Amino acid sequence: MSEAQSITGEQSIARELTAFQTNILTILAKEPMYGLAIKRELEDYYGTEVNHGRLYPNLDELVDLGLVEKSELDKRTNQYSLTDDGYDAVLDGVQWSLSKIVTDDERADEIRDIVENSY
């Protein structure tokens, strides 16, 4: 079995993904990318090399779960993009995190500052 645990229902998909898979979805929320670009983004985040043997099986599982769409750019390169369900999974994770982090007005203001300075 790959990194994800068994999926029990569509609503729980986002909550059953590994952090690695969630990070892939988060990267793809920005824009569609090919595999090596995703790999570079993950390596920048983790500060270490990400094996092809870890990345591509997880991408394939996210495709199988309907969270990512895979298309062929050319004979050797696939492009990956977030589906609507994948975007919903990212939002579900953000919403859950914020529900735990934002406990008062001061923290809400800190999050607003982060959001306003992120784009």
Image (tube, rainbow, N blue to C red):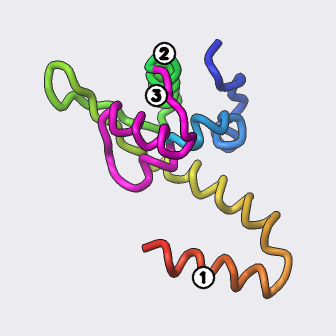
Instruction: Identify residue type, mark 1.
Output: Asp
**Gap between marks 2 and 3 measured at Cα:** 11 Å
- Disc 1 target residue: 113
Name the N-terminal-most of marks 1 and 2.
Answer: 2
Query: Which residue is painted at 36% across and 42% down in the image?
Result: 81
Q: Is residue 22 left or right of residue 87?
A: right
Q: Is residue 106 left or right of residue 70?
A: right
Name the N-terminal-most of marks 2 and 3.
Answer: 2
Q: Secondary structure at mark 3?
A: helix
Q: Residues within 10 Å of mark 2 (few under 14, many from 20)?
A: few
- In the image, which is nearer the foreground, mark 1 or mark 3? 1
The secondary structure that most of the magenta stretch takes on is: helix
Instruction: Identify residue type, mark 3.
Output: Leu
- Disc 3 target residue: 59
Which one is in front, 111 or 66? Answer: 111
Q: Secondary structure at mark 1?
A: helix
Q: Residues within 10 Å of mark 3 (few under 14, many from 20)?
A: many
Query: Which residue is painted at 65% across and 39% down in the image?
Result: 19
- In the image, which is nearer the foreground, mark 2 or mark 3? 2
Q: Which residues are magenta?
A: 25-51
- Disc 2 target residue: 53
Whether residue 81 is situated above or below residue 94 in the rendered picture = above
**Residue 83: x, y in percent?**
42, 45
